[in-house]
Amino acid sequence: MALLELKGINKSFSRNKKETLAVKNLSLTIDYGECLGLVGESGCGKSTTAGIIARLVKEDSGTVEFDGHIISGGAYLKPAGRHMQMIFQNPQDSFDPRDTLLDSVMQGAKSYKLWDREELKKRAFDMLDYTGLKMSYADIRTSELSGGECQRAAIARAIICQPKLLICDEATSSLDVLVQAQIVDLLKRLKAEKRMAMLFITHDIPLAAALCDRIAVMHNGEIVEEGATKRMLKAPVHSQTKKLISAVMPAAGGMDGKISKENNNE
């Protein structure tokens, strides 16, 4: 049984009396401990799909099953919420700028009432340490953090409840290249050490390849190709997959050579 399974998801939006189909008959699965990269150009439906999974957006039809429970009908949402967390492209927008860093991280678990305040505070400090944030930052406001620090804080808040699935919606796209690499390394640690499944949403196929076990390419609301990362890079079939790869790796050796070098450096 998969951790997450979407079956026949459809979602449309109405703008100026015109109906736009954002997600079309979409099906996908993520196994326990697996990282799936959902890759595509802006506007292809990736973030809408993430919103449907996280129950921020209601699908028009289809089913979402998480950890053995149907959640698309509205049941099981609070337990599912604890085990499914999301980090966003602009983490600053998800924090109250008046809150301290420690309070912001604790906020990720408060509504589930798992621990008393002292235990929650201890766990929040543990999360700061795990994500590479200085303990001396605990009492500063989140508005004073850099972009990379704020994304680390968002990850700390998301993982304090030890979720089974972490949804990363363009979580590195607003960061510079060095900080981006550091965040990807942190996500790799989460996957390896905590066996946390991930949905990694990005327009950047090399970034997805550095982290993900499988890649699904999305185009015009549909998944047009899906497979193991190495196969997708070495022998892409769909024209959209080829387009995404050629856009970043036009030189000889292609993505397969790049990933081999990265893996050798790990």
Image (cartoon, rainbow, N blue to C red):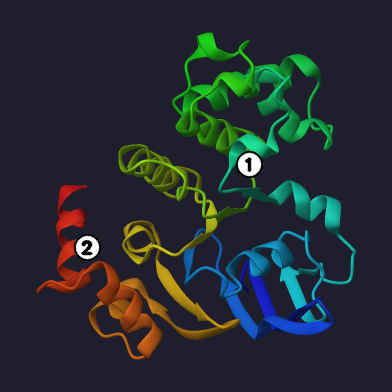
The residue lying furthest to the front in this view is 16
Residue at 51% x, 33% y: name it.
152
Residue type highlighted by circle 2: Ile
Quarter of the image with the N terminus is bottom right
* Numbered disc 1: secondary structure: loop
Indicate the secondary structure of the residue bearing disc 2: helix
Marks 1/2: CA–CA distance:
30 Å
Q: Which residue is mark 1?
A: 162
- For the residue pair 177 and 214, the one nearer the viewer reads as 177
- Residue at point 71% right, 20% down? 103
Identify the residue at horizontal 35%, vertical 58% (top origin): 207
Is 217 left, or right, of 123 in this rendering?
Answer: left
Q: Amino acid at mark 1?
A: Gln
Label 2, on which residue? 259
* Residue 67 seen from this side: no
Q: Which mark is residue 84?
A: none
